[in-house]
Amino acid sequence: MTDTPVSPAPAPAAKPAPAGPLVSAALDGPVGILTLNNGAKRNALSEELLDTFISALEGLQGHNVRAIIVRAAPGMGVWSAGHDIRELKHGAGDPLGYADPLERALRAIRACPAPVIAMIHGTVWGGALDLVLSCDMVVADETSSFAITPANLGLPYNTTGLLHFLGRLPLNLIKEMFFTATPVKAEDAARWGIINHLVPSAELETYTMGIAQGIATKAPLAVAVVKEQLRVLTDYQPVAAQVFERLQEMRRAVYASHDFQEGIDSFLEKRKPVFRGD
Ligand code: YXS
């Protein structure tokens, strides 16, 4: 994948220094490439990384790109470890509220006029799976796996996020993923429909770029309007105000619970959580 670096990130040198931007943006003709670059923290989705991601995504749109690929830096065994757990605070209200940086990034991807393709080498955890499912397509290799993990933290996932899953997977598979927090391996992810294509690692970049370049030859206005129609038709499910309030009340009890604090503490103390159910 040959790319030409674009602003806002300073043009990376041939081999960007390890302390390079958390997310780098590049152009390969009409295809934009966003690369997650925080290997030391397994591309944990911190506010800083996500703000960089959102501005890089918006920056690419200024270059009239026709398709965008989101990837981790080459050779990383973890595509993204999900929401930065160090930024999840017990007693600070909804951990996945509308203004949360991860929620802002998901909305930016879903509102981007150009199709966004997630290219997955390595493991995907928690909110990073919601980010991957917010992309328009997913191409992955045999090293990939996909886990949604609020049950490991005692965290109440948000209703918008559940709608993202309902828009992609059968209910029984969503329940298995949320209730067990077990990573879904590449073969099953392909069979379940989490990913569009499962390709060998050696072909992942070429295959993904091939799809992106194919899209880039199509009428961009027609592609963008279908993307927006599908977003509106899937994201806006009518929910009665009283029902929404009841769900929020249930979530409030969970994110105020001892178990949520235990989930965060156990991760930071690198030990297994002991959930008491209160
Ligand atoms: O100890 P240092 O400072 O070197 O940092 C370690 C980890 O603490 C850090 N790190 C993270 N920091 C914040 N948030 C994270 N999610 C996170 N994940 C990792 O990265 C450094 C290297 O981690 P280490 O030593 O564990 O790497 P590894 O290669 O042995 O293991 C990679 C993972 C991904 C298997 C392991 O790091 C892991 O299990 N991470 C947590 C994955 C996870 O549960 N993610 C869900 C986050 S919560 C979320 O996304 C949603 C809100 S929800 O809960 O609803 O799904």
Image (spheres, rainbow, N blue to C red):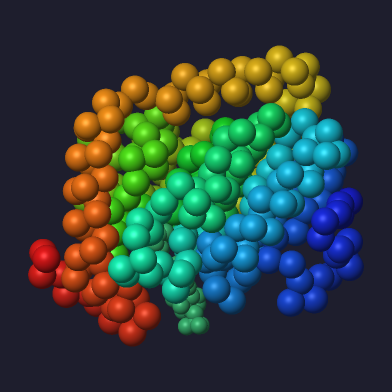
Q: Does residue 61 appear to the left or right of 208 in the view shown? A: right
The quarter of the picture where residue 161 lies is top left
Q: Residue at x 26, y 60 (%)?
A: 255
Q: Does residue 140 appear to the left or right of 258 in the view shown? A: right
Q: Residue at x 82, y 56 (%)?
A: 8
Q: Is residue 26 visible?
A: yes
Q: Residue at x 61, y 71 (%)?
A: 39
The quarter of the picture where residue 180 lies is bottom left
Q: Does residue 23 appear to the left or right of 198 in the view shown? A: right
x, y (%) of residue 177? 29, 47
x, y (%) of residue 106? 54, 44
117 is higher (above) or lower (below) than 102: above
Q: Is residue 72 visible?
A: no
Number of numbered discs overlaid on the protein picture: 0
131 is higher (above) or lower (below) than 243: below
79 is higher (above) or lower (below) than 261: above
Closest to the observer, 115 or 91: 91
x, y (%) of residue 215? 73, 26
Q: Does residue 219 appear to the left or right of 22 in the view shown? A: right
Closest to the observer, 121 or 111: 111
Q: Quadrant of ligand 1?
A: bottom left
Closest to the observer, 83 or 74: 83
Residue closest to the far bottom: 269
Q: Residue at x 72, y 52 (%)?
A: 55
x, y (%) of residue 159? 33, 40
Q: Quadrant of the C terminus?
A: bottom left
